Amino acid sequence: MDNIHIFVGGHARQNNGHAGIGLCFYTDPDNQPFYEEGEYIGIETQNSAVYRAILKALAKASGWRMKNVTIYTDNRLVVGQLVDNMSARAQNIVPLHDEVKKIASNFERCQVNFVLPGNNRRSKELARAAAIASPETITAQALQFEIQSGITGLILAFTPKLMIVQFKYRKGSKIASHQHIHEQASYLLRGTLKYVVADQDIIMKKGAGLVVSSNSVHQIEALEDTTEIVTYSPMRADLLKIS
């Protein structure tokens, strides 16, 4: 796997506050990412957070011995400074800019491309979620949401690398066949669920546990009213609504 596409996002709460980065790695940008990551990075500006996301992406690609890397960001200023030779003058940006240039020179090919924000949504969600998950502010979140009629979720707590969610199912409710890159571990507090994983039927009753590997196709049916605790690694940014 010599070619890799990495979408990066950086987010600072206010322009100089708690910040996070998000990385999504693809072999083909039209498909699902094969790896994603969110990380809290401390106090940064919006632009420096994007630079740090690029540095983390390049370090990961280098560690995996990738030869050709394409970075995508929706930050026009950063792209202009790295690609169009716009001046990088801010004291906090100059060393980051120079470090990106230095690391990028170690690849056979390394490009930085601008992408519209709508096409970079996933990495930005990871960055926004990571920005609020600082060591000082990690708490029980208690964020409730509805998946569909008869199925509700309650996010109990999360960091960029882990999320704990309580799901409640009404008897007869179903989640259609799907997959995601997250590792998933399930524990039933009450009720009965039927999981179908890799075409294998698995009946879970109270006290049962189940692990669903990354990218495994699975579906769920509630055979009675059920409460389930699920942990995801990394966090499910798509379950969060964070500004």
Image: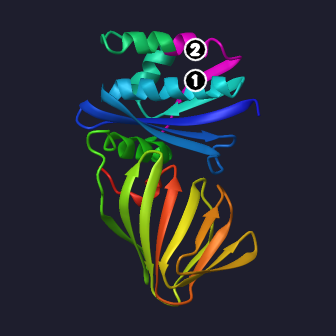
For the record, the magenta segment spans 100-115
- Tell me what residue is drawn at x 60 percent, y 28 percent: 60
Q: Are marks 1 and 2 in contact (CB under 8 Å)?
A: yes
- Tell me what residue is drawn at x 47 percent, y 9 percent: 98
Image quarter hosting the N terminus: top right
Q: Element under label 2?
A: helix
At which x and y percent is residue 69? 65, 27
Is 109 on the left-hand or right-hand side of 121? right
Which residue carries the number 1 mark? 59
At which x and y percent is residue 148? 45, 77
Which residue extends farthest front? 207
Q: Mark 1, mark 2: which one is toward the viewer?
A: 1
- Tell me what residue is drawn at x 48 percent, y 45 percent: 161
Give the Cα distance between marks 1 and 2. Answer: 8 Å
Where residue 85 is drawn, which disc sits there?
none
Which amino acid, mark 2? Ile
Find out whether residue 108 is within the magenta segment.
yes
Depth check: 60 or 161 in front?
A: 161
Asked which quadrant contains residue 146, the reply is: bottom left
Q: Decide: is 53 above or below 136.
A: above
Q: Decide: is 239 above or below 123.
A: below
At which x and y percent is residue 203? 65, 81
Depth check: 212 or 126 in front?
A: 212
Q: Element under label 1?
A: helix
Find out whether residue 47 is within the magenta segment.
no
Is 140 on the left-hand or right-hand side of 202? left
* Classed neighbour count for the residue bearing mark 2: other residues with Cα under 10 Å, few (<14), some (14–19), many (≥20): some
Q: Decide: is 211 above or below 71.
A: below
Which residue carries the number 2 mark? 103
Which amino acid, mark 1? Ala
* Classed neighbour count for the residue bearing mark 1: other residues with Cα under 10 Å, few (<14), some (14–19), many (≥20): some
